Image: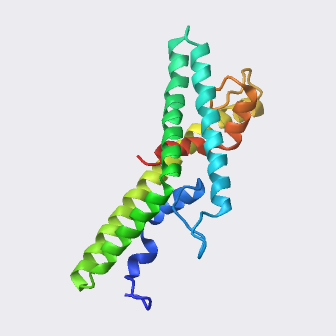
Amino acid sequence: MTDSGQPAIADHFYRIPRISGLIVGLWPQRIRGGGGRPWHAHLLFVFAFAMVVVGAVGEVSYGCVHLDNLVVALEAFCPGTTKAVCVLKLWVFFRSNRRWAELVQRLRAILWESRRQEAQRMLVGLATTANRLSLLLLSSGTATNAAFTLQPLIMGLYRWIVQLPGQTELPFNIIVRLWRTCCTTWSGTNAMRGLGK
């Protein structure tokens, strides 16, 4: 127990999902005393939402244009439709933010109400396991995203250094060049696939 009466594990409650949610402005947070969400959370959400929408529209459009080559079309449709589902999930999480915050607070109250030593040990064990599994999901998604994004860029750099013929390909199959630039700049859109899985 800490001085505030909360268990020592309280600081680590939902740590990994909280980090992921804060990055995209979705984690339920309130301004002290005001009750509203901070302005920067809205800004982060709008930016993340716009990037995922641009990626979804661009990749699905690319797939539609290249229907004559099924492999190329599917290479665009698969991540494009995954991003489209992520757009839906982002919107649902954003719209349900107040209810989500209430649910997190109720869970905290339920978990903290038992002051027995064995209940606290069980809470620490379960929270540790949950954090480890969340970290595994986050780190595997980040590693996959990094490999997917960096591999064509490294191959292009190698071709350029060794002066091999060939065109440098970017990791995204997007129909509009501006959208390709935006999505390459902020390659975290693929990390959004893991949100809520």
Q: Which colour scheme is used?
A: rainbow
Give x and y (percent) for residue 182.
72, 38
Q: Residue at x 57, y 69 (%)?
A: 35
Q: Residue 7: which quarter of the image?
A: bottom left
Give x and y (percent) for residue 141.
48, 47
Residue 109 falls left or right of residue 93: left
Q: Exactly how many numbered labels are in the figure?
A: 0
Q: Residue 113: which quarter of the image?
A: bottom left
Res. 173 in view: no
Q: Which residue is drawn at 74% across and 20% down?
A: 165
Q: Residue at x 68, y 27 (%)?
A: 169
- Quick one: 68 or 7, which is closer to the camera? 7
Look at the picture and state if 97 lies above or below 70: below
In this view, which residue lies farthest toward the bottom? 3
Res. 168 in view: yes
- Quick one: 154 or 179, which is closer to the camera? 179
Residue 148 falls left or right of residue 135: right
Give x and y (percent) for residue 181.
73, 35
In this view, which residue lies farthest toward the top? 68
- Quick one: 114 or 137, which is closer to the camera? 114
Give x and y (percent) for residue 151.
60, 36
- Quick one: 182 or 144, which is closer to the camera? 182
Image quarter (top left, top right, bottom left or bottom right) of the N terminus: bottom left
Look at the picture and state if 47 lies above or below 84: below
In this view, which residue lies farthest toward the front? 34
